[in-house]
Image (spheres, rainbow, N blue to C red):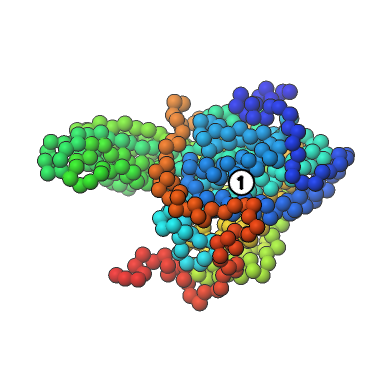
Amino acid sequence: MIWIEKLSAGLARVIAGTMLAALPVAAIAQTASPSADALKREGFAIVDAGADRIGRINDAIYSYAEIGFQEYKTVALLTATLAEAGFKVDKGVARMPTAFVATYGSDGPVIGLMADFDGVPGTSQKPTVLAHQPLVPGAPGHGEGHNTGQPTLLAAAFAIKALKDKYKLPGTIVIYGGPAEELLASRGYMVNAGLYKGVDAVIDVHIGTDLATSWGLQNLGILSAQWTFTGLQAHGARAWEGRSALDAVEIMNVSTDFMREHIPPSARMHYVIPDGGQQPNVVPGEATTWYYFRDTSAKGVWDLFKRVREAAKGAALSTSTSVTERILSASWPFNGNKELAEVVQSNIEIAGMPQWSADDQAFARAYQKSMGAPVVGMPTQVGRLRKASQASGSTDAGDVSWQTPFVRLRIPAKPDGELAGHHWSAGIAPATPLAHKGITAGAKVLVGSAIDLMTSPEALARVKAGFAAQLAQYPKWKSMIPPDADPPTFLNVEEMGRYRAALKPFEYDPKSRQTYLEFMKVSYPPAEPATAIGLASNDPNAGGE
């Protein structure tokens, strides 16, 4: 078929073959296809029927607390669940062990569903507990709620598959498992491997406090790079015999700090020193500094990177060391497609916000009071479609949005009011009944949107025409990742290894007779605090001078 010929060899292998396995739902007799509205109602009912199972999968992912490129248990659960449901699963795509693509169908249109699933270092937190209480001090956790994304995709994909099987609907569903979003490190490599070629539209899912989408440029482009300096190791008491690689790192970082005054206000750069030496009495013979660069355009990112590259050369020259450079990953800002956003928005309005229980609202209000935030509970109205603005964050999903029509759907799986992003306070809600309802609402939006795109050639044609016009307004996309670069799958090996054994007693079996909160012996909703106990527990000076 023509559409298969357009696919890359990688994705073509994924979708090839006959998919005979059925979903683990009641068998349905094949009949003539009903209207789109009737299909959506039936699909929503399937989502509701599977909500408990999906919620348990969500909670298990939360309990694994795995960070970028180390999401092995998460991926094992997701891929096994998809394979059991009859999806063709291709693991280890684009040379990343925890990246996967799962496909059901063998004709067009091809609809991609995508979400993150990695955690955040240092954000371990007991679910529903309103003050800082890590499961394991210092350990990773889901301090952005990425555990909610893939379960949303599963719930939608299973419903769409059931409808396809029953009514012989056209189209192919592709589930993208892109790891290490917090490292901004996987989707650029997946794009360069051709895994989005031939895909007619992609809907990305991310946790939020509302049910909403937007279009246009959002977030900043980004580039991640490391510079490693090599000097001459020596005894610290006879430092003149050595050449300090750490001195070079510090000189480079000071240079970029002075540079900040002279870069555009839209630009951002930040760094850490992952390797600065072993102990003070040894002159470091090797040291590494790691930077993220952000700006509103890929050109801005690249220009900033080139200036800092010169600072690295200068630092090496001034310390009689040598320096090597490695670009780890990069992405353009993501650019939502207006016409696809309109399709998604129409289904947001059909699906509607979850019907929050009294317990859900009590949890939201208690959470907000604990964080010292306005006590407003959960919203009851869906968000309006809007044109996005470029905020300070970034995502590696950006490169995908320049390959095919793309939008991001935010699902209401947490209350507003967290103390900071990438923070333990953001990990309190994503494994609760409130989060489960947000996942269910998001899955219904995906089901409705996929039905529109698969059954209405006119709708898909509008999306494609809009995308062509959209791309014409910008420079031609070109990857900022060097063609010979390897995915940085070495990242987080030591960090995750440090905590796996300690986290294991807290891992949840989604087939357990207990719910996750019962397993964790926590209450939902928690008692409303008298004061902002979460905010107080975040004070580094609490308990002493």
* Viewer-closest of 112 and 218: 112
Q: Which residue is the extreme one toward the right?
A: 32
Location of mark 1 (residue): 150
Specify whether 543 is left or right of 154.
Answer: left
> Which of the image's four quarters has the N terminus?
top right
Name the residue located 46 percent from the left edge and 71 percent from the top edge: 533
Specify whether 202 is left or right of 272.
Answer: right
Specify whether 185 is left or right of 89.
Answer: left
**Position in image of residue 212 (x %, y %):** 64, 53
Residue 399: quadrant of the picture? top right
Amino acid of disc 1: Gln
> Which of the image's four quarters has the C terminus?
bottom left
**Position in image of residue 107 (x %, y %):** 74, 30
Relative to residue 542, is residue 393 depicted above or below?
above
Assess disc 1: are there few (<14), some (14-19) or many (≥20) residues with their C-alpha within 10 Å of its C-alpha.
Answer: many
Specify whether 500 is left or right of 251.
Answer: right
Viewer can see residue 24: yes
Name the residue located 48 percent from the left edge and 46 percent from the top edge: 67
Name the residue located 61 percent from the left edge and 43 percent from the top edge: 78
Relative to residue 305, is residue 254 depicted above or below?
below
Name the residue located 55 percent from the left edge and 28 percent from the top edge: 193
Q: Which residue is the extreme one toward the bottom?
A: 530
**Position in image of residue 445 (x %, y %):** 70, 49
**Position in image of residue 490 (x %, y %):** 42, 37
SS at mark 1?
Answer: helix
* Viewer-closest of 248 and 504: 504
Viewer can see residue 44: no
